[in-house]
Image (spheres, rainbow, N blue to C red):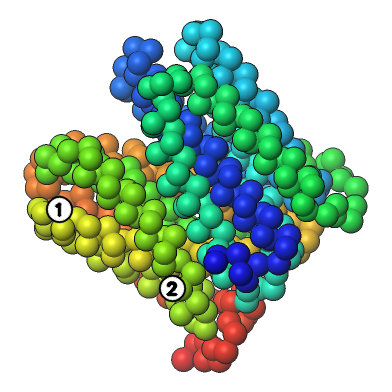
Amino acid sequence: MPTKILSPRLQSLFWSRLLLAFAFGLSFPFIPIYFAARGLPLGVIGMLMAANLLASAFGHLAGGPLSDGLGSRLTMIASLRWRSIATMFLALLIFFNAEVSLVAGLILAASFIGHLFQPACDAYISSEVSFTQRSSVFSSMRVGINAGWALGPAVGGLLASHLGYGTLFALTAVLTGINALWLDRKLPVQPPVSPMDRGHYRMGALVRFWAKSFDDPSWRFFVQIYFLGSLVYSQLFTMLGLYLSRYRGEPEAVIGLLFGWNGLLVVLTQIKVTKRLENIPLTLACCWGLVFYAMGYGLLSVIESIPMYFLAVTITTLGEVIHSPAANALTANLASQLGGSARQGSYIALAQSAGVLGSLAASVLTGYLLELAAPVHPSYPWLTIGTVALAASVSYLFLQKRITDKEILGLRRYNKIND
């Protein structure tokens, strides 16, 4: 069981993350389909999806400072409560066939509010476990998230044609509200944090703080690599389906099975893989994860059969299960070291927002690669992304040379850091 290594508090958070992923997966993946049914052009839908990612990035940026000022527990619960309310209003707008602009605006608001949760959640985990245990804990959390994501869209897809999109969003709102009640009941009240100095949390002060944080060369370098890693990771979901459909002629059923295979592999292998890698530096784990991404994407550039597609996705998913928890743990460790308890959430938020912008860049890059590079040769898009993955992989090796603190590297029994 992925909860075996977790404390009772973190077990409660694990089930919360699973329920949240399921609730979100019930409805939000179908937003583009809803807008298309309302008659919006594909270009406009693409712009709305990009705006949704920007709203997510701003939500991360706001959630970190709120976690520092109000406490991570209160920020998580408040995010869930307000997201539940916003999503219920969104369901009502859909039920009454309101103006598309109103629906789009409320989707952006719900996305902003919902993503206040993530940096607060990571800050809470960091306060509960030591530097060396964080990779294992983040690994366990990813199992819950992927299980929820595997179930949510599948159930939502079955219900959509029978109940309609408004009902799906209403169910999401109810489950999110239940989630807030669950955490409020299960997570003990934290000791009061220091009273917020409002001057520290104004937009101008926060921007200056984040800009000042880049004076640290290791942190600046890490955020840049984190952006590239998110760009590489996101291509599996932004480009694979379109590529296989347009250039390989594969049906939606095959593409859906590939994505389902990805989620199943994460659930089955995540804990075991992280356990095997617990005694190497987090930077080296990130490096190896990106190497597997490059190998999987490289294979996609030359194959043309369904069994080989599954092999390529298997290799790429191995990169995901190696890289993602290590990158999350390295983010938390750097944030704890640089920001302490007073600014940890703000550091985490900055890295996570860079990751969301990486996903946004992946969406934009997908369009250009498929429109401009793929017609020249179908292999070029995947070779391009594979090259980015290798560049990010090598960058982690350079980052390891900059970091000599064993706690930040998450080391347990590894002694030779910079041979």
Q: Position of residue 379 (x, y in %)?
A: 14, 52
Q: Amino acid at mark 1?
A: Ile
Q: Is residue 412 left or right of residue 296?
A: right
Quadrant of image for the N terminus = bottom right
Report how many numbered discs are placed on residues in the image. Answer: 2
Q: Is 303 located above or below residue 397 in the figure? A: above
What is the secondary structure assignment of the residue under circle 2? helix
Between 25 and 124, the residue placed more toward the observer is 25
**Label located before the other in sequence (1 or 2):** 2
Residue drawn at (43%, 53%), measured in percent from left and top? 230
Q: Residues within 10 Å of mark 1 (few under 14, many from 20)?
A: few
Q: Camera-side residue: 51 or 32?
A: 32
Residue 341, quarter of the rendered image: bottom right
Task: Give x and y (percent) for residue 76.
Answer: 71, 45
Q: In this view of the protein, which residue sits in the foreground, 299 or 97?
A: 97
Amino acid type at circle 2 is Val
Question: What residue is pinned by disc 1?
Answer: 306
| x and y percentages locating residue 311 in the rendered image | 22, 62
Q: Residue at x 62, y 56 (%)?
A: 14
Q: Which residue is mark 2?
A: 273
Kindly indicate whether the residue at mark 2 contacts the one at mark 1 (C-beta within 8 angstroms).
no
Task: Answer yes or no: is residue 294 visible.
Answer: no
Q: Residue at x 56, y 19 (%)?
A: 91
Other-residue count near label 2 (Cα within 10 Å), few / some / many at <14 / 14–19 / ≥20: some
- Using residue 371 as the reference point, say whether residue 343 is left or right of it: right
Note whether 408 is above or below 37 in the view shown: below
Residue 199 against residue 392 in the figure, above or below = above
At 57% from the left and 31% from the top, the residue drawn is 172
